[in-house]
Amino acid sequence: MKKLGLALAFAIVAAAGSYVFAQEQQDSDSMVVVVEQEQENVSKDSGSARQSDLKVSDSAVCTAIADRQPEGASAEFSRDIEKVYYWTRIEGAKEPAEVKHVWYSGDTVIGEVALNVTTPSFRTWSSKTLYPGLSDMSVEVVDADGNVLKRDTFAVK
């Protein structure tokens, strides 16, 4: 009876562990110019070994979005451009999830935009108004666990 109780307790703990993992997992063709990919699925928290189910299959820094597609994709933008967009196609969502577009000027975060991913293949974008003093910029796609799924860089000249 004691062995049965221990086995039952182990089964409950194992099931709970699976549930917690599943819960964590839940939280967790286009014209495109990919400028530079520095990191993929790398957690900012070095203690985390958890990989994301989400992948960025396409991305572009561009001057416009038309029919949910990027237009004017480039690695370099003129200072007279007022706004740029970061367009991404996110793959692999098994259920609704959130990603962030984190905008940088050099190493300084200048904006974060939370975006909901609601289907297994989802296009989404954010924008950033360009202002004097910006030059070397980048945008990261970060999942809810802090994994950097993609990083694209561009210049304002």
Image (cartoon, rainbow, N blue to C red):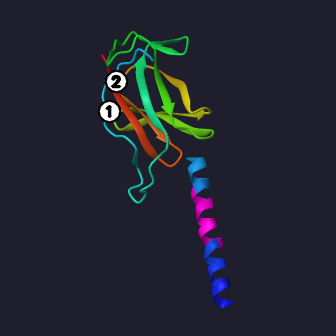
User: Residue 113: x, y in percent?
Assistant: 54, 32
Residue 74 circle label = none
Mark 1: amino acid? Gln
- Could you tell me if residue 127 is visible in this image? yes
Between residue 84 and residue 88, name the one nearer to us. 88
Magenta stretch encompasses residue 82: no
Residue name at image x 69 percent, y 89 percent: 1
Instruction: Classify 111 as above or below 62.
Output: below
Query: Contact, CB < 8 Å: mark 1 with mark 2?
Result: yes
Would you say the magenta stretch is mainly helix, strand or loop?
A: helix
Residue name at image x 40 percent, y 44 percent: 41
Label 2 belongs to which residue? 34
Residue name at image x 35 percent, y 19 percent: 33
User: Residue 52: x, y in percent?
Assistant: 47, 46
Q: CA distance from mark 1 to mark 2?
A: 7 Å
Residue name at image x 47 percent, y 26 percent: 88
User: Residue 75: x, y in percent?
Assistant: 32, 19
What is the span of residues highlighted in magenta in the rendered image?
12-21
Determine the secondary structure under disc 1: loop
Instruction: Classify 21 as above or below 155.
Output: below
User: Residue 25: x, y in percent?
Assistant: 56, 50
Between residue 88 and residue 109, name the one nearer to us. 88
